[in-house]
Image (cartoon, rainbow, N blue to C red):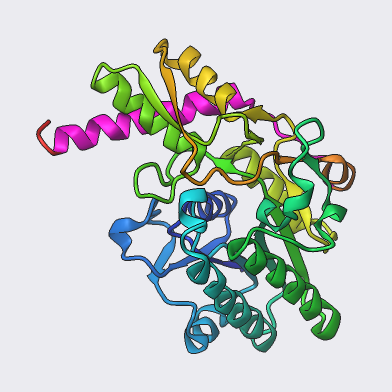
């Protein structure tokens, strides 16, 4: 019989891509998401797609019955503009993971995946522009991103304790700024790659040459294209490694450099307008991939330049489609 996978947060960006990946691999996939289906980023008709609220333990018990594997990607999150202004909502996502872990134990799930984040890393370790790469061991002493980062770090430990106390096999990925097609680009939850792609689309459409940048543009980040993320996730899930591990790009850029990349992609040069009153996040963050290379023999294959070209083409086509739909 086909192995059955439950993907919570399946209507979201990474969840949708992950569900499609495993459906193509021959697994029987169930997607669950709290959102109305008209707001799902992808819907695969070969997958059982359910609108469900995993904050209800009765729901998680039902969803996980007769399931082999659970991938939990359900949480309230977004870019810095969202997480800095919705800390309580982000923290409440803990309820989802706790319910799913309890249901996994009850229903004897074979393996459980939790999507953590680079936001678990302490703020004091993200101020050095010369050494932005974060190793897994840098997570402690803890001082994560307020709200969202604390929720992720807490649930990493919950997963670990469910293995230690109950023998539940867990896998934990610390994702670093995953981007790509079929994700947020205009709803206030978008991250820098999609937000900047949208701003370029607007600038080109309206024949203007100004782009607003949050902060001073010198913030260092690394961005991981979705295909590399899914490949790394699959390798981790199939491995025997239970500790949290970075799934990110170790090639970093500044936000200013990301704008320059979009200028080359589009042939559209812009004047950068800096708004230092807006949330800009930490100064310096990138993934140290020493451990993931050793354990999984995984490295990103898609450059930031190539990934951003794919993302911009998607966002620009969606932007034009929206304009046409609105008769503009």
319 falls in the magenta region: yes
Q: Could you tell me residue 255's position as x and y percent?
A: 57, 29
Q: Nearer the viewer, residue 156 or 100?
A: 156
Front-lying residue, 257 or 96: 257
With respect to residue 129, does 264 lie above or below? above
Residue positioned 87% across, 46% down in the render? 291
Question: Compared with residue 145, is residue 220 higher up or lower down, i.e. above or below?
Answer: above
Q: Is residue 251 left or right of residue 276?
A: right
Question: Does residue 305 appear in the picture of this structure?
Answer: yes
Please report the residue visible at 49 percent of the width from the left and 12 percent of the height from the top.
264
Estimate the x, y position of residue 2 in percent, counting from the top left. 60, 65
Q: Is residue 168 above or below residue 146?
A: below
Whether residue 49 sits left or right of residue 178 in the image: it is: left
Query: Which x, y percent locates residue 112?
Result: 69, 69
The residue lying at 19 percent from left, 33 percent from top is 323
Judged from this view, the residue extending furthest toward the right is 294
User: With 64 as the anchor, is 149 left or right in this view?
Assistant: right
Task: Report x, y in % for residue 10.
Answer: 48, 60
**Quadrant of image for the C terminus:** top left
Boundaries of the magenta span = 296-325
Q: What is the magenta segment's predominant secondary structure?
A: helix
- Judge whether residue 148 is colored magenta: no
Residue found farthest to the left: 327
Which quadrant of the view contains residue 292?
Answer: top right
Quadrant of residue 167 within the rendered picture: bottom right
Name the residue at 42% across, 12% down: 269
Q: Quadrant of the N terminus?
A: bottom right
The answer to which of 175 and 27 lies nearer the viewer is 175
Residue 79 in view, yes or no: no
- Name which quarter of the figure residue 258 lies in: top right
């Amino acid at each position: 019989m086909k192995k059955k996978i439950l993907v919570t947060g399946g209507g979201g960006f990474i969840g949708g891509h992950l569900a499609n990946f495993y459906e193509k691999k021959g697994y029987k996939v169930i997607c669950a998401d709290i959102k109305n289906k008209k707001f799902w980023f992808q819907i695969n008709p070969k997958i059982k797609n359910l609108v469900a609220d995993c904050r209800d333990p009765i729901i998680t018990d039902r969803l996980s019955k007769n399931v082999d594997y659970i991938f939990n990607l359900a949480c309230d999150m977004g870019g810095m503009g969202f997480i800095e202004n919705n800390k309580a909502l982000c923290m409440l996502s803990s309820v989802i993971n706790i319910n799913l872990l309890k249901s996994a134990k009850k229903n004897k799930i074979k393996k459980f995946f939790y999507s953590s984040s680079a936001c678990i890393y302490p703020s004091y370790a993200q101020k050095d522009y010369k050494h932005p790469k974060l190793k897994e061991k840098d997570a402690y002493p803890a001082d994560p991103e307020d709200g969202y980062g604390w929720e992720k770090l807490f649930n990493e430990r919950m997963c670990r304790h469910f293995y230690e106390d109950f023998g539940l096999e867990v896998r934990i990925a610390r994702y670093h700024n995953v981007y790509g097609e079929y994700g947020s680009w205009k709803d206030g939850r978008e991250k820098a790659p999609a937000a900047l792609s949208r701003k370029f689309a607007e600038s080109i459409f309206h024949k203007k040459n100004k782009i607003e940048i949050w902060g001073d543009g010198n913030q260092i980040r690394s961005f991981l294209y979705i295909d590399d993320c899914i490949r790394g996730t699959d390798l981790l899930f199939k491995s025997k490694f239970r500790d949290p591990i970075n799934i990110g790009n170790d090639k970093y850029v500044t936000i200013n450099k990301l704008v320059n990349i979009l200028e080359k992609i589009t042939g559209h040069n812009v004047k950068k307008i800096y708004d230092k009153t807006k949330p800009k996040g930490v100064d310096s963050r990138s993934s140290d991939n020493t451990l993931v290379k050793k354990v999984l023999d995984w490295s990103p294959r898609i450059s930031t330049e190539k990934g951003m070209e794919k993302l911009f083409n998607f966002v620009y086509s969606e932007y034009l489609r929206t304009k046409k739909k609105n008769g503009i």
